Amino acid sequence: TGMFTYDPGFTSTASCDSGLTYIDGGEGVLLHRGYPIGQLAEQSSFMEVAYLLLNKELPNKDELDKFIWTITRHTMVHEQLATFFRGFRRDAHPMAIMCGAVGAMSAFYHDSTDITDPQQRMIASHRLIAKMPTIAAMAYKYSIGQPFLYPDNDLSYTGNFLRMTFGVPAEKYEVDPVVEKALDRIFILHADHEQNASTSTVRLAGSSGANPFACIAAGIACLWGPAHGGANEAALNMLREIGTPERIPEYIARAKNKDDPFRLMGFGHRVYKNYDPRATVMQQTVREVFKAMNVKDPVFDVALQLEEIALNDDYFVEKKLFPNVDFYSGVVLSAIGFPTAMFTALFALARTVGWVAQWNEMISDPAQKIGRPRQLYTGPTQRDYVPLDKR
Ligand code: CMC
């Protein structure tokens, strides 16, 4: 069995070549096609970042307009998909609905599933990016018993999503530009993160030549877990449970206790052994949104103080545990009005860009092979079958 490298959790195995995203975990650096995440979050837009990840370069004005036009054209979902939603229980988790609805897309868009055709791959990618906000908003509307809203293509990608989520047919919905900008930035922060668990899942699923919509559904399933995208929901629930700064030490003590499975949600990262640069932008975004909306939430103070206490505690210092992207995102999403159950669905919406870009990169890579990890066998050696009456 000495033939294989044993690497549970793939902590030291590179599974592919990739030109999309660079992370220096020690320094806390994140670059998309070379551009620092801080600059993209400040100066770019989610549509521009999507174009960059898919097409390798930032678009010029014409290219961006055309890209936005294309995405906008694909925002509607097949009318029959609405019927599909009605099969879910009203109290279904939005991620359960997302898994199902996006998986079901594989049964609708047959003209974009020949993965050997780069053009069809691009159409599938555009469809996925365009329809995720519609599907996420539908998941929300379904849970609260309000009618689905059709996309309004006069709005921006993010503005349209806000309207489909919070608007009702009876009233004109005014998109708040501060909220729109903040959410667009949150989408940028989640767009891609090299070979994380859900992206690796999409690549592995896609490596067999599977239907692209089904592959993205696999990514959504993986993202749902609390160790990955589900951490934003878990982090806000934790902060609300802590409730007041006085109770922080109790939770810090629990996180440090080896016999307690509790972890500080939104803390720690496989790759970052320094501050997650996305958390820096996210914390700033909380301040901006609170100021513009004139809101306060005691949960933000709990988060800030928890961070400060943890960053001065030997346990977290030694293990190099810092806040990650999920630590502050819930605070701002909740201020915007999203229920906690929607947080991971928003992550999925944004990460779809990374998933399709990585999937395209993989399919067009001549070195691409089906993903097929090996194992170290630990079961019994060969033995003879024992008939039932002899057992
Ligand atoms: N609270 C307390 N202790 C922790 C934490 C935490 N949040 N994270 C890691 N540790 C400890 C862990 O107990 C282990 O200690 P020891 O070496 O004594 O056994 C050590 O730090 C290393 O942890 P690990 O689990 O071996 O590290 P990993 O790279 O396998 O896990 C992680 C990374 C993100 C899953 C983990 O840090 C974690 O569970 N964090 C909380 C969940 C979370 O915030 N996830 C979001 C990740 S970022 C974006 C995303 O994907 O959504």
Image (tube, rainbow, N blue to C red):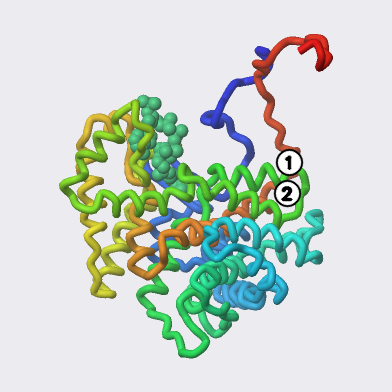
Label 2 beta carbon less than 8 Å to ligand 1: no
Residue at the image point whose x is 28% and y is 35% from the top: 254
- Residue 249 appears at what percent x and percent y? 20, 40
Q: Which corner quadrant of the image does residue 14 belong to? A: top right
Answer whether residue 365 is visible to the viewer in this image. yes
- Residue 319 appears at what percent x and percent y? 33, 30
Secondary structure under the numbered disc 1 in the rendered image: loop
Between 209 and 331, the one lying in front of the other is 331
Between 11 and 166, the one lying in front of the other is 166
Q: Residue furthest left?
A: 246
- Residue 105 appears at what percent x and percent y? 71, 63
Secondary structure under the numbered disc 2 in the rendered image: helix
Answer whether residue 271 is visible to the viewer in this image. no
Find out whether the residues at labels 2 and 1 contact each other: C-beta distance under 8 Å: yes
Between 236 and 131, the one lying in front of the other is 236
The disc placed on residue 211 is none
Q: Residues within 10 Å of mark 1 (few under 14, many from 20)?
A: few
Vertical order, 360 against 337 (above or below): above
Residue at the image point whose x is 66% and y is 51% from the top: 359
Q: Residue furthest front?
A: 389
Q: CA distance from mark 2 to mark 1?
A: 7 Å
Ligand 1 occupies quarter: top left
The disc placed on residue 363 is 2
The three-letter code of the residue at mark 2 reads Ile
Residue at the image point whose x is 24% and y is 63% from the top: 297
Q: Which residue in the protein does label 1 denote?
A: 368
